[in-house]
Amino acid sequence: MLNWLDIIKFANKGNPTPPKRVEKTDEEWKAQLSPEVYRITRQKGTERAFSGEHCSIFEPALYGCACCDTWLFDSRQKFESGTGWPSFTQPVRENNVKYEKDLSHGMRRIEVVCNVCDAHLGHIFPDGPMPSGLRYCINSASLKKVNTTSLRTATFAGGCFWCTEAIFQQLKGVLNVNSGYSGGAAETATYDRVKTGNTKHAEAIQVTFDESQISYEDLLRIHLLTHDPTTLNRQGADKGPQYRSAIFYHNDEQKAAAQAIMEEIQSEYNDPIVTELAAYEAFHKAEDFHQNFYKRNEGYPYCQVVISPKLQKLRAKYSDKLKDNNPTIQAKKA
Ligand SMILES: [Zn+2]
């Protein structure tokens, strides 16, 4: 959990690496956004207090950036500050927002900005409720409600989670990907315990996706085509049960879909698909070091040799499923 000292440090010494970048010209933003949203997000405007649609609503919801859809805040961290602007105590992920010193209007403040597209969101103050003590004071117009009724969870294993995470992060309709461990016997899992192979956990990813934008079936197809589901307990040079191919289904619908798609994809492989199909039990999020690994370490030899070709395969086969305006993808396509 972030506290005020963390925020000061980010503003003074540099912000966390964003999960991705979206960059557009001023003309493109103008064409995409309403005049009010453009004024606030791209020209550092402030809406009138109590005027925004999200300022006094507290029902369960996720809030994305009005410009680039990046998932920024969750209603569980929302509180009534009485200020007339939506107020939060934490962002959804530490690296989705950034902090800039703002000396405008004769004040010393810290501005909150979308770390993906640089949209102005609002300001942050150290007078929020405990335990964080933070108040993210955000313009309602900078936020877009994400429809939570169509949000679903999927859990997959396909070898090293640095790879699987990098693949699913590229997909439209995928709001969040966590790397971790699933399918094991022990109550908790850490990298050091899992790598022995003794806990029976697989390196896995937990994907939060919006079913109205991408189907579970498509996630299954992409999963089965971007790793090798025909090698038992092994992906390339990575050997051991922690690198096995698996689909951990969350309900009977997911189970039936997985059976059907495995059958469908079998024709793409000469050898039989040996992917484990098992009921989901638990997911243990991996250490911070392993989250967003590819994004932070593209030059790392493993990423160059193992992950980059997989991403290229994904781009070639599923370009219509990829997020728009992802500069990483655009640059590599060229
Ligand atoms: Zn944004």
Image: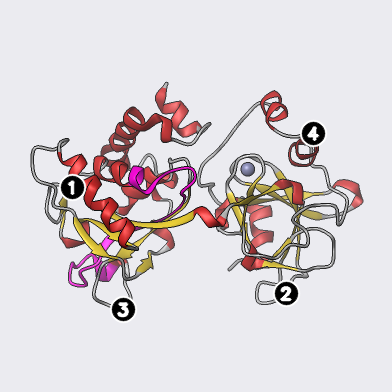
Residue ID for mark 4: 35
Real-space Cα distance between discs 2 and 3?
Answer: 33 Å
Q: Could you say where residue 326 lies in the image, as x and y percent from the top left?
A: 50, 34
Mark closest to the chain's N terminus, 2 or 1:
2
Residue at x-position 20% and y-position 69%: 200
Task: Give the residue type at disc 4.
Answer: Pro
Q: Of helix, strand and loop, which one carries label 2?
A: loop
Q: Name the residue under label 2.
A: 129
- Mark drawn on residue 110: none
Is residue 108 something one can see in this rendering? yes
Crowding near pointer 1: few (<14 within 10 Å), some, many (20+)? many
Foreground: 101 or 58? 58
Any atom of ligand 1 within 8 Å of the CB at mark 4?
Answer: no
Q: Which mark is residue 229?
A: 1
Q: Name which of mark 4 and mark 3 comes first in the sequence.
A: 4
Q: Give the range drawn in magenta.
A: 192-219
How far apart in space, not on screen, are marks 1 and 4 (Cα)?
Answer: 49 Å
Q: Which residue is drawn at 65% across and 76% down?
A: 131
Coordinates of residue 216 in the picture (x, y in percent): 37, 49
Closer to the camera: disc 4 or disc 3?
4
The verdict on residue 239 being magenta is: no
User: Which type of secondary structure does the marked residue at label 1 adopt?
Assistant: loop
- At a point 33% along the width and 34% down the height, the residue shown is 314
